[in-house]
Image (cartoon, rainbow, N blue to C red):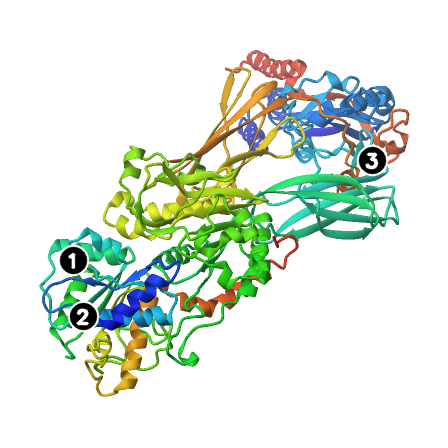
Amino acid sequence: MNPARAILTALLALTPGVSFCFSLTELDLGEGCGVVDSTRDEVLKALAAATSVDPDITRKKVRLSDPALFEEPFLVLSCSKAPGALNYDEARNLHLYLAAGGTLFANDASGLRKSPFSLWLTRALEAALPDAVLKPAAREHPLFKSFFMSVAPGGRFDLEREPSAAEYGARYAVIFSRNDLLGVWPRDALGRYLYEPSPGGARQRREGEKLTLNIIIYALTGSYKQDAVHQPYIMQRLRELDAVPGARR
Amino acid sequence: MRLFIGANWYFMAAAVLLIAAFIRALKNSAGLPYAIKVLRFSGAALAALLLIRPSAVFYRPSSEKPALAVLLDASFYMREGPAGKDSGLSKYARASAWLAKYQPRLSGAAALECYAFSTRLYKVDCSSPSAGGFENGFYAESDLGRALSSLVGGDGGRGSACPDRIWAFTDGLSLSGKAPLLIPPPGCDKRIDILAVGETDLQRGVAITDFSGPPFAFAHIPFVFSVSARVSGMKDSRLELRLKDGADNIIETRKFTVNSHDETIVSSFSVSAPSVGRAAYTLCAASGPGGGCSASKALAVSVIREKLRVMYLAGRPSFEYAFLRDYLKGQSGIDLVSFVILRNPEDMPGADERELSLIPFPVNEIFLRDISHFDVFILQDFDLRRFAADGNYAASLAEFVKRGGGLAVIGGASAFGGGGYYGIEFINSLLPVEIEKRPDFDEDLEFRVAPDKHSAALVFSGIDNEERFWNNTPTLKGANIWGPLKPGAKAIFHYKSATGGDAVFSAEKSYGKGRVMAIAGPSTWRWKLMGARELRYSGLYSAFWSRSLAYLDGSLSLEKVTLESLPRSGASRAFRLKVLTANYLPPSDSDAVSVDAILEGGGKTEPVEFLPAGRGIYEAAFLPAAKGRNRLRVSVKSGNVYLGSTEAVFESAAAPGFMPADEEVLKKTAALMGGGYHRLKFNEGPEAMLKALPPEREGRKEVSRFDPDTSLIVMLLAAALFFASWILGRFKGLQ
């Protein structure tokens, strides 16, 4: 077992009242796709260390045809090649999943600006979510401030300033990074990073880590951070309404 | 003597042409003897005269009495209401008796005509006006304006110009509250006197004459009560109008100084109700500061929600939080403020604080300052010991519920036993279930819930094969294992525990005026995501939370269809129907609400039409189907969805108690008519009022008249002239 994984497992097991409310479940589309154990372990370790989320480190994979798909509200799909085309049932399940509140984080590990995977994803979403198109995420979106203030591009590559997203039901149902956000995480057995982000180095890695965790927190809280902008206004309005005699409980 | 011509112009022209033609014919008859010419001309002239229908009228000088019309109000109040507090005589009988008593004097002074009026005008005998039969108007109020226009313009009345004087005997109750007030008919200005029938005086003191508010009010949204109080015999004293809530707490006080012996004070109160349900209010009128209530009136208002205010507090990010927050944000009827603990004190983000988007958890604001602004507080997987350790916070939460708030406690590893709720007395006392001292969350427990017999569990009404439906719902995962229900608590949903027995998944308990619902696990999101695979479960998640919130804010206690009697004097009845949709909101046009109503009484059944009078408000006014007990049955649907039914039972035709004449309205009416205002007193004759009559007019009286066209003598004379002319012609040898 990876030493980091062993430490994390021990830590979580010893923490009283822990409930694993999040797992980094992979969408299994076959060859060319997958998240290495080290990446998952590092991401979950960072998530557990930085936030109040208690992650489940068990490796989980689901296929689009698997009923268990609907038990996992957050899915990761990291590919360096284009998976096989979706059949009708798979496309329908992807549609139902995303429409009902599921979130898909797609990570392009190829390092190509117009990769076969990005083309595949575009086509897949045309079938599954015809009304939603992948567009660069708005900089003011809560995605960039769900936990960390994410101010610069991050990831193993520097192919885009911000990830793309497909909006459905007033939320980002699909988030797609061409910069290989997951590529900044894996380490070897000695604890050294496997890949050096280019061209930004450590700073680009740090931004990639922050954005990765922001995406997870966004899936777990929605646009909660946007509420913070409106809440003072809502509270002021409620207080004014309650200034009328007899109104306060 | 005066001469008149009765024919129109073409008969007169025909007569002239006849004479001209005759003269011309006589001129052309040169050999005709003069005597015959005279005879023939005389006959023709007489015929022409008859053609123009002349008449002669012979007069002699005489005097003419002024015309006086007496109108007796025959409304229900006049005919059935006693004339005084201790009188056994109705106001109508009192007015009739006065009229009969003074009728000789009135007839001596004026050309008297008497009428009774309710909804129509009836001519009656002035010496016994009670004998007139007008059963059709028995139940009705009276309409003085219509009676006056009928009197002047015909339609059962005199059918001529306005009489010299009109006396209207009325108590003014049919005029009360009507707008606009009357205006005199053309030609009747300053000719109409008002005579108040019955006692007009109220006893010294205060009477609340109006205390009304809207049929519906939205919680937290201000609405207005209109109030008026009549103050008699208390000039220069102080009066306070106090509005109180259902618990007898004074909400607001208005202070006045009474400026006259008989004054009506009109005011209003703007208030807002803090929670959903029937809110009771009382208006108290008190003499002076600190004085007790001299008069009071109660009123209940149906308070519904326009916006439900929800505070949602989660102890950590989770899919339950993400899904429920998304659902609540998507409801237009909900104002949501939510907070989630993103980082615990022991967490190490490995970044400078400036790189984090976190804000301090505003525990004071949430639990102490602003908690009263919310209707429902949701606490999910929240460890109160860590984030709200001060006992004041838990006490404030308990006070919030006690005053009528709704609290939902959703489970998780940091809730209930794991959240130390057992040791927090204020929280533990709120909960409907017994909880453990130690962590009680089993995250691997996978189960299906089934509803208990509870209104909050009726998430879908009328589903086919309910048992099969619940046996196949998406499973939930993870639950706090509770002890038994506390006394007074009720289970809403249960599940099969690992041992095979029933375990409570959600339960509720009332606390003070509020409600608490405990939900054992934070995985209802699975109903939404897993429900997407099967159409029949796709609405389960939203239906569960909609129903739970309706329970927590008290909406479930509201009836969707309610009927209330409106104050209405007289025999007719008025009812107001208030309708709420399945979401406990007033319906809009798109809800296609239909109302079926029938009135039953005396073996008869009659349809009743309720007319829209506002959003969700329908009103109907009708006469009872029969004397005695009547039953109004109402059934309401929205499209094809049955919303509910209700009924009201009432007794009809009860004789009204003593109601004093509305002197204020009568004086206003008299002033508008330009006439005088008098109070009818049995022992006081009409002399004072008769002075307003114009004097008798000098005139002439027709003695006889002569109409030649109807006179047999004239006809015989004409015939004789023509006959004589013919005989004479024969003697002269004319052919």
Of the two numbered discs 1 and 2 in the rendering, the one whose residue sits closer to the viewer: 2
Calculate the distance from the C-alpha at mark 1 to the C-alpha at mark 3. 86 Å
**Mark 1 or mark 2: whose residue is earlier in sequence:** 2
The residue that label 2 is drawn on is: A36
Pointers 1 and 2 within a single chain: yes
Picture layout, residue B62 above or below residue A198:
above
State yes or no: discs 1 and 3 in contact (Cβ < 8 Å). Answer: no
The label nearer to you, 1 versus 3, is: 1
Q: Disc 3 marks which residue?
A: B202
Tag 3: Cα neighbours inside 10 Å, few (<14), some, or many (≥20)? some
- The x, y position of residue B620, in whole percent, is 54, 33
Q: Secondary structure at mark 3?
A: loop
Relative to B644, B620 lies left or right: right
Q: Position of residue A72 (x, y in %)?
A: 26, 57
Q: Which of these two is toward me, B86 or B412?
A: B412
Mark 2 nearby-residue class (10 Å; few <14, some 14–19, many ≥20): some
Q: Pinpoint the chain carrying mark 3.
A: B
Q: How packed is label 1: few (under 14 Cα within 10 Å), some, or many (20 or more)?
A: some
- Badge 1 and badge 3 in a common chain: no
Q: Is residue A61 visible?
A: yes
Chain bearing tag 1 is A
* Residue kind at label 2, given as amino acid type: Val
Amino acid at the residue labelled 3: Leu
The disc placed on residue A63 is 1
Left or right of residue A49, residue B212 in this image: right
Q: Amino acid at mark 1?
A: Arg
Quarter of image, res A84: bottom left
